Amino acid sequence: MKIPLMSELHANQESPDILFWVGCAGSFDQRAQKITRAFISILNKVQIKYAILGKEEACTGDPARRAGNEFLFQMMAYQNIQTLNNYGIKKIVTACPHCFNVMKNEYPELGGNYEVIHHTVFLQQLIDEGKIKMKEEGGFKGKRITYHDSCYLGRANNIYEAPRKVLEALDAELVEMKHCRSKGMCCGAGGAQMWKEEEKGNIRINQKRTEDAIATGAGIIAAACPYCNTMLTDGLKNNEKEPEAEVLDIAELVNASME
Amino acid sequence: MMHIAAQIIFIIAAATGIGLFVKRIAGIRKNILIGHDADYTDQPATRWRNVLLLAFGQKKMFRNPLVAILHFLVYAGFIIINMEVLEIILDGILGTHRLFAPVLGSFYSFLINAFEILAVLVITSCAIFLIRRNSLKLKRFISKDLNGWPRSDANYILITEIVLMLLFLTMNSTDLVLQSKGVAPYAENPTNRFLISGLLTPLYGSLNETTLVALERSCWWLHILGILAFMNYLPYSKHLHILLAFPNAYYARLKPKGEMNNMPAVQNEVLYAMQPELAPADAAPPTRFGAKDVFDLSWRNLLDAYSCTECGRCSAACPATTTGKLLSPRKIMMSTRDRVEEVGKNIQLNKTFKDDGKTLLHNYISVEELRACTTCNACVEECPVSISPLEIILELRRTLIMEESNAPQEWNVMFSNIENNFAPWQFSPDDRDKWATEIE
């Protein structure tokens, strides 16, 4: 299937309703690619006019900035803002809370002003507008699901309810972990930890967080961030709980439940 | 003569106490201003709202309602009861006894009764806090962060508050006994029987007049001298938060928690590298990247350090601390305060800062601590007085990377991948949309 590219739309003097910012994880990580495909499938089903940047997309610079490398961050930001501004992009949707946070909160000061929406909020809007119709007998009806708050959605940007409302629309039994919402515990990947070995301690962060999730007895751990997804999946493997529970992105859950 | 001597001693004690306090506060203000400038004056309406909700209302404390109520009682009780100090000070200066009693009449008894009830609540709450702190083995209280002085500091404060309240009640109780015995000047300004101290009178009924007067006067003097001493202990202790919580709430960060501070100097350097025609002829490179010492932090960070009461809610929520990593956000704040105190003393001694071969980074906060942070904002979210340990961590990290090229090998790989492949992993940028070709 052909995914519309921004450069092609631009050449035809067209503009999309939304630019889907895929992000590095969504582009390269095999697990996260599935999330990307699920989200694309939803976009196609609701017939939204969208585009991606394709090869013109580059890392937002989030891990570099949080590790302390401001130069590299500024270089990436400069490059991305040039690309986005050249295309006159107004509205961006992304499935990565880190890309979302940087573009929403940090690009404006550098000259990049866009309406940036995280995919969970976007999905909630589509559900509210009646554009997403769930199957009568959705696959998750009555299933026990727990939602893991991403730090960069929750505390960083106060997005707690949208992902939960989407899950409620699945008719699933939503159960909360001991630490949730503003008290939610990090998966361990933020602040560029994803790219380094954890400092020494007595337990890995993702291990501890996964134990919280397992304690709910939920068969599905819903995530809204590709990095949380990786960390929690690894946590399940280490706990040898993989057959009993799985980590799925909100977009995957919605896509699987749509007509 | 005795009266006049007492009045003079009182005036000297009060003036010394207040003078020392003002001097110390001015010193702290100077220390805070060691930090660089930063603007936190936008949106005054939101800022006043924060003062009301976060400082007066202690909103964040109510994340644990039971503790919040006890804490609120101690705070409200202490503040309200200290309204009594106004009368004590005037009595002390003028040589009067219970100046307000005849003026306020039955309202006076109402006030004292209210103070006495609060005093009992303060004593009870402080006692519960002492037990909680020392016997319940709560992780954030037994943490090694508090070893030594910080742990004693917390106990001294609670004990002092209990003692001050007991002095207040004993003073009132002996006063009532002296009134009933018709002793001047106590009997000249008769009050109603007070609610709590009235119950304690049987304890003192058998004492003779001289002993009673000595006891009442001792309580009066110890109470006011205790308050003056406590006031001067405050700015050397973690307890300073009872004052600084207010400015700290006013100057709270209002940006989304996920937003990092921009570095305009670096932004411009990158801009000039990309578009050299924009570069001014005299563009000087920045002198410092991030923060290495307290001078490089903002005054806001240093106000944070002085406002921290070492409660440890940040560390109790920190994913690094709770999984046994070396990092503890509370310790970041304590280290920052220790260092700014040291620098302040250095400046006071040498007129200007004399290099002591130490910096906040490395000597006070280690690389291992900084490396453990996931930037999850749990510490910032939890802090009842709007402190951000995260901002300090991130500024120190900037120096580590940009000035000292001090990064774990994996981060260097990540940096070079972003630079060359536009992604943190080693994939070809040409494959960025390869996933799209794999969709049916």
Image (cartoon, rainbow, N blue to C red):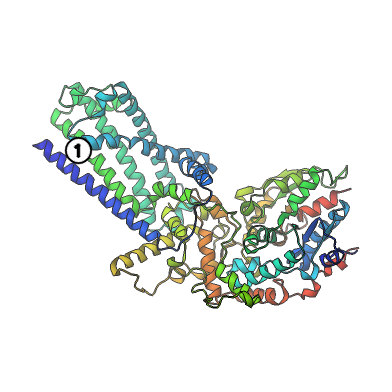
Image quarter where the N terminus of chain A lies is: bottom right
The residue closer to the viewer here, B232 or B178, is B232
Q: Residue at x 49, y 52 (%)?
A: B41
Q: Is residue B340 above or below residue B109?
A: below
- Residue at 40 percent across and 44 percent down: it is B130
Residue B426 place in picture, x, y as percent: 73, 75
Q: Position of residue B396 (x, y in %)?
A: 51, 67
Label 1: element kind: helix
Horizontal side of B387 relative to B105 (left or right) equals right
Residue B126 in view (yes/no):
yes
Given the current orientation, which residue lies at the most extreme left position? Answer: B1
**In the figure, is residue B68 to the left or right of A51?**
left
Tag count:
1
Q: Position of residue A218 (x, y in %)?
A: 73, 48
Residue position for label 1: B93
Q: Amino acid at mark 1?
A: Ile
Q: Is residue B290 left or right of residue A95?
A: left
The answer to whether B245 appears left or right of B64 in the picture is left
Residue A232 in view in this figure: no
